[in-house]
Image (tube, grey):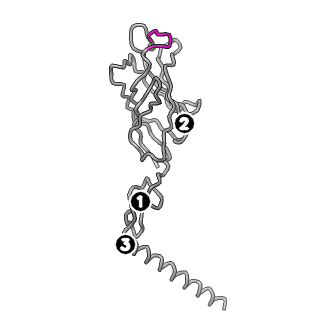
Amino acid sequence: MKHLLYLILLITITIFSSCKDDEQKKICEDIGCSSGRVCENNLCVCSDSRFVGNNCELQKEPKSISLKSIEVLKYPSKRIDGSNWDTNSPPDLYITIYQSIDPIWLLPNVIVDGGLNQSLFIPIDSAQIVNVEEQHTISLYDDDGSLVDKFMAGVLFTPYNDTNGFPEKITVDTGGLVAYELTLEYSF
Ligand SMILES: [Ca+2]
């Protein structure tokens, strides 16, 4: 009797799952998949794997974001007292990115005499941001060799926005003294 019950249960499960498979196959092949989805192995999946949800409307949070370049768009041309950063030349720029007070990336090379009349586009080899939804600060300094470097300006930014569609480039400009354009690469 016990064996008979197991047998009935097994048959029921088999019939049910086979119905489900047929139904899924029917949905994919005959009816098609809803917006943003494609039929793959008889399953409706989001055509862009970076999205999830019934209508592929939700962004999948990236595990990390790599910074591929930084371009300095503006910085304060003078110090707060009106004097030049360096006496006879533009400031020698370097950038540090902080999460809270922890530096997570430091520009390896100083841009000597980084004047605003020249391109301040900086390609980057490896700068990985892991806590993508945390607020970060990009700080700009004037390198002064053996003297204490001068802090020029900082700006806050959050690397990841879950509704903006994974832009390759973002502008970090809060209307303050300094602004950047960043090139981003998302890893999942
Ligand atoms: Ca300097």
Identify the mark at residue 31; answer none if there is no mark.
3
Task: Give the foreground label among 3 and 1.
Answer: 3
Asked if ligand 1 lies within 8 A of label 1, the reply is: no
The residues tagged by marks 3 and 1 sit, at their Cα atoms, a distance apart of 16 Å
Q: Residue at x 38, y 58 (%)?
A: 47
Q: Which residues are magenta?
A: 78-84
- Which image quadrant is residue 42 in? bottom left
Residue carrying label 1: 46
Mark 3 or mark 1: which comes first in sequence? Answer: 3
The amino acid beneath tag 3 is Ile
Q: Secondary structure at mark 3?
A: helix
State the quadrant of the N terminus. Answer: bottom right
Identify the residue at image location x=58%, y=87%.
8
Residue identified by numbered label 2: 135
Q: Is 82 part of what is drawn in magenta?
A: yes
Q: Which of pointers 2 and 3 lies earlier in the amino acid sequence?
A: 3
Distance from Cα at disc 2 to Cα at disc 3: 44 Å
Estimate the x, y position of residue 48 in percent, counting from the top left.
39, 55
Q: Please name the amino acid that badge 2 sits on.
A: Gln
Q: Main secondary structure of the magenta part?
A: loop
Q: Does residue 63 sit above or below 90 in this rendering?
A: below
Image marks 1 and 2: residues in contact by CB distance under 8 Å = no
Residue furthest out toward the bottom: 1
Q: Ligand 1 sits in which quadrant?
A: top left
Instruction: Establish if 79 lies above or below 179.
Output: above
Name the secondary structure under disc 1.
Answer: strand
Magenta highlight on residue 140: no
Residue flagged by tag 1: what amino acid is it? Cys
Of labels 1 and 2, earlier in sequence is: 1
